[in-house]
Amino acid sequence: MRIVLLGPPGAGKGTQAHRLAERYELDLIATGDTFRWNVQNDTELGREAKSYMDAGELVPDDVVVRMVVHALSSVKNGFILDGFPRTLTQAQALEDSLGEHGSPLSAVLVFRLEDEVAVKRLAGRRTCPSCQRTYNVEFHPPKSDMVCDYDGTELIQRRDDEEHTVRHRLEVFKAASEQLEKFFDARDLVRVVDADAPEDQVTERATAALDDLAEHLAGG
Ligand code: AP5
């Protein structure tokens, strides 16, 4: 399976991407996580991306596309893309790259969530800087005080989760989301997932949507 997750900041794309990647044994490519790793390790890519990320702006298309095409080249069993594409240019580049290998997308899940719920979720988000898993002080606290359940690393709060930056990220998302959805809808790949429910329920909705789409594409 080759899956794209679309949706506003805070919709739970990262949370669900980890769950779906485990369930279907897929590689997870999360552009935000890759940028954050590069910022943390002060690489050239990280230095290039940092100011855009801190301001809640998109990193330029050519930088992101190069990074994703490179990541896709080592995928074996299929993938989940979290956070890419975010513009039509990126969507077209993805389609071209997959087309060259005769392995088109299988599904695009569009997560829907009201702005105010997203803002609340992001205010409470804590992230593991090591494995990138996310927690929430209110909805999904770690088992032990502010360290990652999986690797014991101390959790951090993302710089771009301040409310005014979150609201700007929501606007940036809205500016491109309709066009992106149309692009994938025209290829009959889209299923909408209501993301305003507990995590387990959203996972059930996402897997049901993937099953439904697979059946539909198989002519069932
Ligand atoms: P990125 O890291 O991709 O951020 P985003 O898309 O804004 O999404 P978020 O990570 O904020 O939210 P999410 O939907 O993953 O939610 P999560 O699962 O964490 O991008 C960051 C930046 O990188 C961009 O602003 C840009 O600068 C740059 N960038 C990245 N990709 C780019 C691209 N393609 N082009 C250009 N620039 C790019 O959940 C959020 C919180 O809610 C957590 O605390 C979680 O525990 C909680 N939660 C999750 N699900 C539920 C639930 N069902 N109920 C209650 N709480 C929940």
Image (spheres, grey):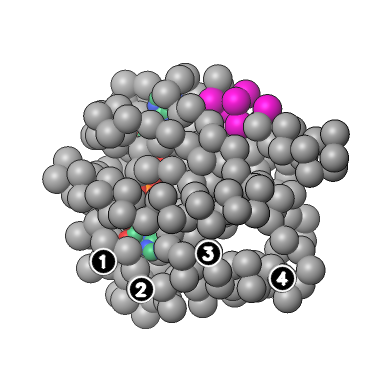
The residue singled out by tag 3 in the image is 91
- Is the residue 77 above or below the residue 22 in the image? below
182 on left or right of 220: left
Q: CA distance from mark 4 to mark 2?
A: 23 Å
- Kind of residue at badge 1: Tyr
- Kind of residue at badge 2: Pro
Question: Where residue 77 sits in the image (x, y, percent)?
Answer: 77, 55
Q: Give the residue at x 26% y 61%.
A: 57
- Magenta span has 49? no
Residue 204 makes an appearance in the image: yes
- Disc on res. 63: none
**Of callouts 1 and 4, the N-terminal one:** 1
Question: Along the line of sight, which residue is nearer the eye, 58 or 30?
Answer: 58
- Magenta span has 205? yes
The residue singled out by tag 1 in the image is 52
Residue 31 makes an appearance in the image: no
Magenta span:
202-208
Q: CA distance from mark 3 to mark 1?
A: 20 Å
Q: Is the residue at mark 2 in contact range of ligand 1, meaning its CB lies under 8 Å from it?
A: yes
**Secondary structure found at label 1:** helix
